[in-house]
Amino acid sequence: MMNKRMMRQAQQLQNRLAKAQEELEAMSVEGSAGGGVIRVTMTGKQEVTAVVIEPEAVPDLDQADIELLQDLVAAAVNDAFTRTQELAAEKMGAVTGGMNIPGLI
């Protein structure tokens, strides 16, 4: 049985984890390739919010095609990430017997 001090410490830890998660959700990072001709912006929740493909990366495409390509790449990356989360949840659920353990997924 947990004593009051342990319960308070557990609650404080849970509060700190929730605050850190909120801070991550508000942050974003940018990754790039090809000397910056392709850039991806992603939130701390690992959601792609922007893909920029400079015209010199795809010289045979016009701007409308580049914009469509950017949107398609962002959607594909987000879809793949969602699928990896679902796969991880499935695999971890098999290990934990369906118990929801915060922080594992």
Image: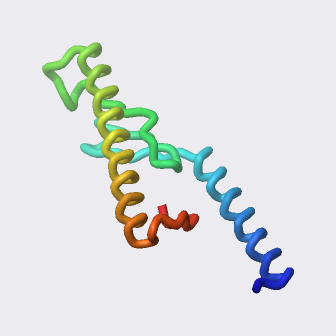
- Left or right of 38? Residue 22 is right
| Residue at x-position 29% and y-position 20% | 68
For residue 5, above or below residue 59: below
Q: Nearer the viewer, residue 88 or 98?
A: 98
Residue 84, image x, y percentages: 34, 52
For residue 101, which quarter of the picture? Answer: bottom right
For residue 32, above or below residue 5: above
Residue 73, image x, y percentages: 29, 33
Q: Quadrant of the N terminus?
A: bottom right
- Left or right of 20? Residue 34 is left
Residue farthest to the front, as pictured? 97
Number of numbered discs visible in the structure rendering = 0
- Left or right of 10? Residue 104 is left
- Left or right of 89? Residue 103 is right
Q: Nearer the viewer, residue 20 or 41?
A: 20
**Colour convention:** rainbow
| Residue at x-position 79% and y-position 76% | 7
Residue 100, image x, y percentages: 54, 63
For residue 2, which quarter of the picture? Answer: bottom right
For residue 34, above or below residue 66: below
| Residue at x-position 42% and y-position 39% | 48
Residue farthest to the right, as pictured? 4
Q: Nearer the viewer, residue 11 or 75?
A: 11
| Residue at x-position 77% and y-position 69% | 11
Residue 46, image x, y percentages: 46, 48
Q: Nearer the viewer, residue 20 or 33?
A: 20
